[in-house]
């Protein structure tokens, strides 16, 4: 499973568990328009740390938060291969 596939699966699973209507995910989808809330994102980040072995938000000093789904995926892809 690719990093992107793992992230999509977590977005979908958390949306179901949190009774959220998840927007169609594309690289251009703004995270604020995804249908998820801050609790949902916290759950996703925690689960991705377990699944991928990295939390890019914990290791970055000069943090630029991702604004789109594509940026979110790229952040994990970058830190997964680092």
Image (tube, helix red, strand yellow):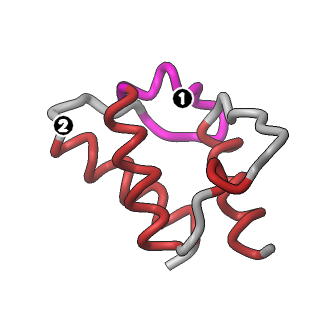
Identity of the residue furthest to the right in this view = 62
**Residue name at image x 59 percent, y 39 percent:** 69
Q: Could you tell me if the residues under marks 1 and 2 are in contact, i.e. CB atoms within 8 Å?
A: no
Lateral position of residue 29 relative to residue 28, left or right: left
Quadrant housing the C terminus: bottom right
Q: Which mark is on residue 11?
A: none
Please name the predominant secondary structure of the magenta segment in the image: loop
Secondary structure state at the residue bearing disc 1: helix
Find out whether residue 73 is within the magenta segment: no
Compared with 57, 69 (above or below) is above
Q: Position of residue 38 (x, y in %)?
A: 39, 28
Q: Quadrant of residue 8?
A: bottom left
For label 2, the crowd category at 10 Å Cα-Cα, with few meaning under 14, some 14 to 19 and many 20 or more, is few
Compared with 70, 51 (above or below) is below
Q: Give the range drawn in magenta.
A: 24-37
Camera-side residue of 72 and 60: 60
- Label 1, label 2: how many angstroms apart (C-alpha)? 16 Å
**Residue name at image x 15 percent, y 33 percent:** 19
**Residue name at image x 84 percent, y 39 percent:** 62
**Residue indicated by mark 1:** 31
- Which of the two labelled residues, at mark 1 and mark 2, occupies the earlier sequence position? 2
Secondary structure state at the residue bearing disc 2: loop
Q: Position of residue 17 (x, y in %)?
A: 16, 45
Q: How many numbered circles are shown? A: 2
For label 1, the crowd category at 10 Å Cα-Cα, with few meaning under 14, some 14 to 19 and many 20 or more, is many
Q: Where is residue 1 in the image (x, y as percent from the top left)?
A: 49, 79
**Residue indicated by mark 2:** 18
**Residue name at image x 34 percent, y 47 percent:** 43
């Amino acid at each position: 499973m690719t990093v992107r596939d793992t992230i999509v699966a977590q977005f979908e699973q958390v949306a179901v568990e949190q009774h959220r209507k998840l927007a169609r995910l594309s690289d251009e989808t703004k995270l604020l328009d995804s249908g998820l809330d801050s609790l949902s994102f916290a759950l996703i980040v925690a689960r991705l740390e377990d699944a991928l072995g990295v939390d890019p938000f914990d290791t970055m000093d000069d943090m630029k938060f991702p604004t789109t789904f594509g940026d979110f995926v790229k952040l994990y892809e970058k830190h997964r291969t680092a």
